[in-house]
Every structure is written in structure tokens, then in C-alpha cells.
Amino acid sequence: MNTMTLWHLTGWEFAALAFAALLVGFSKTAVSGANTVSLAIFAAVLPARASTGVLLPILIAGDLLAVLTYRRHAHWPTLWRLFPAVAAGVVAGTVFLMWADDGIVRTSIGAILLLMAGVTVWRRRRADAGDDPDRVTTRAGRAKARSYGVLGGFTTMVANAGGPVMSMYLLSAGFRKLGFLGTSAFFFLIVNTSKLPFSAGLGLIDADSLLLDAALVLFVVPGALLGRWAVNRINQRLFEQLVIAATVVGGVQLLIP
């Protein structure tokens, strides 16, 4: 794998990665989607493809902390609707990574994130105007779950960027804060864990990446504690605005060369 080892990082590079790991913990327990900033930091410090393999175990650590915090608030019927489509997206993402270079990956994911943010803002404005765009038939609801599931699986496989896509889906489905965080916690713990053999098979995870992870994972814990403290002080409207803003920031960062 084309990556730097722990011993080749400068102090500033390690500090940037440590901050990104702290932000992962915060995003998992407070503002889902904020870890797209972490993705951008990892891709800036490490080679872009290799950075996804280093970041994955950090994300799983954050997922574990989020599940411990919000395990009582998960909505399992939503999860079961999503998983088959997500599995198809993960397989498609694996095939995509076999031939796509870093530039194509970054541009594709950035465009998808901005599209999802735009759709969510449009839905929220229609709802505020008294027109509920999410009042759909059962068939339409299943179609929406499948489309978001495939996109979420694809983006999480190629760039660990599935958080914003699934955030858009859960917001559009009307989830409140705790239900949102509990459902997304279990979703990403299961999905990210299932990605491990795919990432290892692509050479994105090896002994060097795991050694770097061991040094960074400790920074996830204070980030998660900070997020748990902050989430009780954020109202629902601000929560949704922060999720959308984090998605837009992450999408723009991925589009910038």
C-alpha cells in the first residue's frame, strides 16, 4: 500500500490526523456528516486511496462508541430496508476502486454529496411551505430506501463518505436527533465492519496502516465525549442545519483539486 508509516509523519501531520480522529468521535455522537472533514484531512496528509484504509478502523471505533451511547434509539425496520441495497452499493464501489484513480473518486463523491444536500434542502423548504414531499406510497418509500442505500454503500466503500448520504436519507424520513443517531450508529457499525475484508483485499489495510490506527484511535474517545455533551445542547433545527452544512463542506472539499 502506498502510504506513510507512523514513523514517517511529521509532528504537524500527526497532529492533523489526531484532530481528524477526534472529529470522527464528535461526528458519531453529535453531528453525523462532519467526518467528511476528517476524510479530507486524511486524504491531504496521506495518499488519497491509502487514506481510506487508515480511516476505516478509526470510523469503526467511533461507531462502537456511538452504539454504546445511543443503542436504545435505533429503528431496526429502517435498517433492514436499507441493508440489501447497501450491500449492492458496496460491491459496486469495490469494482469501481479497481480501476478509478484518486481524481475520479474525489470528483464523483463530491458531486454526489452536494446533490444529496441540495435534495434535502429542497425537501425541507417544501415541508416548511406546507407541502410534504416525503408523504409517499409504500412502493415509493421502498424505491427511495433502495436508491439511498445503493448510493450510501457505494460512497462508503470508495471514500468512507457514506455518512452524508445516509444523513440525507434519515433527515428526509423525519428522524429526530436520538433516533437519527441511534439508527445511523448501528448502520455504520455493521456496514463499516463488513467493509474490512474488501479493503484488505484491495491492499488498503496492512500492518503499517493498523499501527497508525493504534496511535490515532485514542483521540476518538474525547471526540465522542464532546459530541455526547454537545448533542443535548443542540435543538432539532440547528442539528439538521449542521448536518447539511457539514455535508456541503465535505462535498466542496472533495471537488477542490
Image (spheres, rainbow, N blue to C red):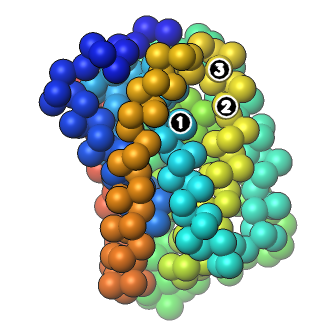
Q: Residues within 10 Å of mark 2 (few under 14, many from 20)?
A: some
In the picture of the structure, the residue carrying the numbered disc 3 is 200
Amino acid residing under circle 2: Leu
Amino acid residing under circle 3: Ala
Residue name at image x 34 percent, y 82 percent: 234
Q: Position of residue 91 (x, y in %)?
A: 74, 29
- For the residue labelled by badge 3, is the local secondary structure a helix, a strand or a loop? helix
Q: Residues within 10 Å of mark 3 (few under 14, many from 20)?
A: few
Q: Are marks 3 and 1 in contact (CB under 8 Å)?
A: no
Q: Position of residue 75 (x, y in %)?
A: 72, 74
154 versus 179 height, above or below: above
132 versus 28 height, above or below: below
- For the residue labelled by badge 1, is the local secondary structure a helix, a strand or a loop? helix
- Label of residue 196 in the image: 2
- For the residue labelled by badge 2, is the local secondary structure a helix, a strand or a loop? helix
Q: Nearer the viewer, residue 22 or 146?
A: 22
- Label of residue 56 in the image: 1
- Compute the Cα span from label 3 to label 2: 6 Å
Q: Position of residue 19 (x, y in %)?
A: 27, 45
Q: Position of residue 79 (x, y in %)?
A: 75, 62
Q: Are marks 3 and 2 in contact (CB under 8 Å)?
A: yes
Q: Are marks 1 and 2 in contact (CB under 8 Å)?
A: yes
- Compute the Cα span from label 1 to label 2: 8 Å
> Of marks 1 and 2, which one's residue comes earlier in the chain?
1
Tell me: 208 left or right of 9: right
